[in-house]
Image (tube, rainbow, N blue to C red):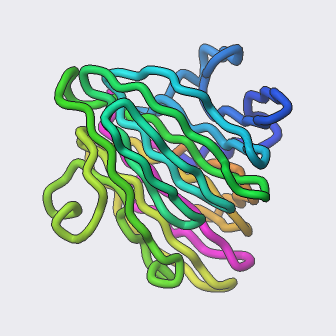
């Protein structure tokens, strides 16, 4: 089953400096039918104005993945980490027992990103942060694992998270397709970053999502040049 979730149906909060869309209940947006998808708890589609951002605030017991769509984001945290993540690249923060951080768009242009939270397999653990470049051209026509809790993915270059989950990304030229098998016991959630695709024949447009259940295999076909991300998490 492929449930299309239109961008226009997402929760919306415009704070001036931040224009956010929420795939799942978050902040002032609450929908009991959209509390998460498997261990995927948050997927926010954020537009951050130049020279603004999220001031220092705490987290614990959450795996937080940031995928930058355009622009760049600069991270600072209470562990002493600092880094700038650019479009197409990824940062991961395992909040563990607790960490405070800020995320600012220090650029002269708007930054657009996906903020993705996954519930860890177990509470606690030392907090940590990491980031990596993932050139978009290297995942043309194939799914590349960007973040994962599986040893084989981490060995192949994915950022580590503390959950039996993975976040993958791909770019497709119009007319091209990718077929991917979904492992037993996993929930899948696909979001189109740019362009449009079909997922097992269901049309998914720019910034729309496909909530996927009871499908052992999906074929993603680009109806125009497209980029998408796929989160696979353990079904709760």
Give me the residue at 41% from left, 35% from top. 77
Q: Is residue 56 visible?
A: yes
Q: Is residue 39 visible?
A: no
Residue extending farthest to the front is 80
Q: Position of residue 41 (x, y in %)?
A: 47, 29
Start and end of the magenta stretch?
213-236
| 215 within the magenta span | yes
Q: Position of residue 88 (x, y in %)?
A: 55, 67
Q: Is 166 on the left-hand or right-hand side of 109?
A: left
- Against 153, residue 77 (above or below) is above
Q: Position of residue 139 (x, y in %)?
A: 46, 78
Give me the residue at 28% from left, 31% from top. 120
**Which of 214/63 is in front?**
63
Q: Is 191 on the left-hand or right-hand side of 159?
A: right
Q: Position of residue 192 (x, y in %)?
A: 64, 58
**Which of 61/152 is in front?**
61
| 6 within the magenta span | no
Give me the residue at 67% from left, 37% from top. 53
Give me the residue at 14% from left, 57% from top. 151
Q: Quadrant of residue 93?
A: top left
Q: Is 114 on the left-hand or right-hand side of 156?
A: right
Q: Quadrant of residue 103?
A: top right
- Against 30, residue 180 (above or below) is below
Q: Is 229 on the left-hand or right-hand side of 16?
A: left
User: Quadrant of the image for the C terminus?
Assistant: top left
């Amino acid at each position: 089953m492929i449930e299309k979730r239109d961008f226009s149906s997402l929760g919306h909060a415009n704070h001036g400096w931040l224009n956010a869309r929420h795939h799942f209940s978050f902040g002032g947006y609450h929908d009991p039918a959209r509390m998460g998808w498997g261990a995927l708890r948050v997927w926010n589609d954020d537009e951050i104005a130049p020279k603004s951002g999220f001031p220092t605030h705490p987290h614990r017991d959450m795996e937080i993945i940031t995928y930058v769509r355009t622009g760049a984001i600069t991270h600072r945290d209470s562990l002493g980490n600092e880094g700038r993540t650019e479009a197409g690249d990824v940062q991961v923060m395992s909040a563990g027992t607790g960490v405070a951080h800020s995320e600012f768009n220090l650029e002269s242009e708007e930054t657009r990103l996906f903020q993705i939270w996954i519930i860890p397999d177990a509470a606690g653990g030392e907090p940590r942060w990491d980031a990596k470049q993932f050139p978009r051209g290297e995942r043309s026509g194939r799914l590349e694992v960007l973040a994962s809790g599986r040893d084989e993915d981490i060995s192949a270059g994915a950022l580590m998270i503390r959950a039996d989950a993975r976040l993958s990304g791909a770019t497709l030229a119009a007319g091209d397709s990718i077929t991917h098998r979904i492992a037993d016991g996993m929930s899948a959630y696909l979001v189109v970053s740019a362009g449009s695709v079909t997922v097992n024949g269901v049309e998914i447009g720019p910034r729309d999502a496909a909530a996927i259940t009871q499908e052992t295999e999906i074929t993603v076909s680009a109806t125009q040049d497209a980029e998408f991300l796929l989160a696979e998490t353990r079904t709760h």
